[in-house]
Amino acid sequence: MSRFAAPIAESIWDMKYRFKEADGTPHDGTVEDTWRRIARSLAAQESDPKAWEARFYAALEDFRFLPAGRITAGAGTGRAVTLFNCFVMGTIPDDMNGIFNALREAALTMQQGGGIGYDFSTIRPKGAEVKGVGADASGPLSFMDVWDAMCRTIMSAGSRRGAMMATMRCDHPDIEDFIAVKADPARLRMFNLSVLVTDPFMEAVKQDGSWDLVFGDSVYRTVQARDLWNRIMQATYDFAEPGVIFIDRINAANNLSYCETIAATNPCGEQPLPPYGACLLGSINLARLVSDPFGDAAGLDDKQLDDLVATAVRMMDNVVDASNFPLPEQRAEAQAKRRIGLGVTGLADALLMCGLRYGDDDAVAQTEAWMKRIGRAAYLASVDLAKEKGAFPLFEADPFLSSGTMQQMDEDVRAAIAEHGIRNALLTSVAPTGTISLYAGNVSSGIEPVFAYSYTRKVLQKDGSRTEEEVVDYAVQLWRERFGDAELPDYFVNAQVLEPEAHVKMQAAAQKWVDSSISKTINVPADIGFEAFKNVYLQAWDLGCKGCTTYRPNDVTGSVLSVSESADATPGEAPAQTGGAMPAEGGEVVYMSEPLDRPEELEGATYKLKWPDSSHAIYVTVNDIVLNGHRRPFEVFINSKNMEHFAWTVALTRMISAVFRRGGDVSFVVEELKAVFDPRGGAWMNGKYIPSILAAIGGVLENHMISIGFLEGEGLGLKSDPTAKVVNLDGPRGAACPSCGSYDMRKIEGCLTCASCGHSKCS
């Protein structure tokens, strides 16, 4: 009998976490083999591996403890990948050599599969003098474009695209440009953006005071703090970015404030980290721990929870020693502080099973109690590890116990730390769990509310046909199994009907006992007023949150999931839900427009490409079409006298031309071709290293698109294309999933996650 609660869970495991050879031959025959592989790998760090392997396996069994995706996919495989999800990179020096060395480090890190975060506040503003060269600085945003181009050409481990976070201080002279940059949907697509908001700035906002924009010792100009705050809020209201990070609050609460200063976070914001800091993530699945669900005695067993947390802490501590690291600085940082981020998933489902409505006072109190229990158990487990294996190398009892987080801990925990030290400097975090939540049976994600009680997923079969599969929330499925078609109680609520204040209350309740931070998205309705929207952020500040991220459907990012409610819906029932505004009947995963008609004559250009390993040149012809006064590529012909190239050049010609004729933003064709690396090695062409002949063809296409004005420039993406549109069925559809093409992308915990295939750039 399968351990998977739903077909989508098995599909996610097979696609993302199952250990296979490059040709697809599986090593993991079952999910039990995956659990055994992880348990054996992490137990190898122990003096008694066999005993700990059994305990680690028991923790993983039935999806009770869910290590983050990098651990699940990589532990025990022998592959040169990191088991850490993401990193904050070193401080960027304000000089050309240092900037491009930082870019190199970023590329090496992303190549091993790690997402990265950077603070760009250290780069001098646009227009500042560059001494010694008689020129003005181009500013941090110009270098962010370079990072963005790099990210789009580096394939991370497991064929995942990398994810990046960029932060900028609220007093940097270029902060207004940073705030507004996502108004251009083609720019900085690989970045999440957040503003580092300081305590003095928030005080100036409340007092309607002035605010200096400074770099070094120079004040570049002075603005009204409230005006700048309104700019941040307006951009977030319109484009869902930037997020807000309360950076002074983070540093004040940090257990390690005596030996580090934080200025950036990982891509999804749950791990504020110092330079070269790494985030190691895992989640306790609360939905699997509720006894007597929906019954009078529903609840969590405290002893079972404590034991599971203790085992999870030990497993994650072992990852620090078992993992590869892209850079030696990252290894040194991780081993000096042994930071881990143990969090939860399935919180909303667990609350439902206990008869509690997400966001109500009782649910807030229960959430705080559960998170305190987990935090307490994690700290005591880390103290026990310190007794056995030693405290983390940079541990200093007095300053550690004086931090904001430690001052609220129970006295017995503080006394134990003072006497024995502690193995891990920080222990708790709530990470994005979109993919692993699907893998665990579609439990609610992280501390988020249930987003959709059910939806229909199209599944591609081996014979090319598609079948429909209902994907049901874990708690709803349990209700159905116990009560059949009985009406859902009124405490069953989801993200579509919750008021924003309920989200903030739940985030604040969890944050109180999380020593790092939380990745959470506060979904707000499209028609929320601007003043009400701003109040969400002020409420987050007032309640002690370390940051705030909202998502409001808008014209730029679209609506990530369409939800409709029938007029005759029974009170208390979940509203009818459909992913991506699909039609009720006949919907398929991918909707494509009809091909553009081909005129009798087209203008174009032919380019000669000489690859060093080939005795014959390749000729690339690109023909263009003019639509609404804009020129765009329409078809491609690739030819060569070298017969070894014949089959793939014909295939490439047909496929690229078919894509071009569909219209829309086809710049991704360039990105995909340029990301192809030939294992036999690339070649130097015109002073530039090209990783493969396909990448060279991608470069030809990119240069052509730039020459006709279709692209802004090399690596800069779409310029302006009025035909780049999606069919509007019942409102905005949003972006298609880059993995499977479906329009089921949801923004959960700060990351777009596909409900159809589980793709997420943050997992």
Image: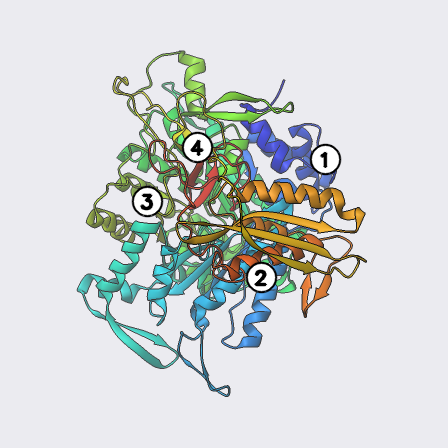
The amino acid type found where label 2 is placed reads: Ala
Query: Would you call the spot at circle 1 few (<14 residues within 10 Å), some (14-19), or many (20 or more)?
Result: few
Q: Secondary structure at mark 4?
A: loop
Residue 470 against residue 213 in the figure, above or below? above
Residue bearing mark 3 = 554
The amino acid type found where label 4 is placed reads: Ser
| CA distance separating discs 1 and 2 | 29 Å
Answer yes or no: is residue 285 visible: yes
Q: Secondary structure at mark 3?
A: loop
First along the sequence among labels 1 and 3: 1
Query: Would you call the spot at circle 2 few (<14 residues within 10 Å), some (14-19), or many (20 or more)?
Result: many
Residue bearing mark 1 = 24
Q: Secondary structure at mark 1?
A: loop
First along the sequence among labels 4 and 2: 2
Query: Would you call the spot at circle 3 few (<14 residues within 10 Å), some (14-19), or many (20 or more)?
Result: some
**Residue in the foreground of this view, choosing between 456 and 690:** 690
* Front position among marks 1 and 4: 1
Q: In which image quadrant can residue 370 be found?
A: top left
First along the sequence among labels 1 and 4: 1
Residue bearing mark 4 = 444
Indicate the position of residue 70 as horizontal and vertical percent values: 60, 45
Indicate the position of residue 103 as horizontal and vertical percent values: 57, 65
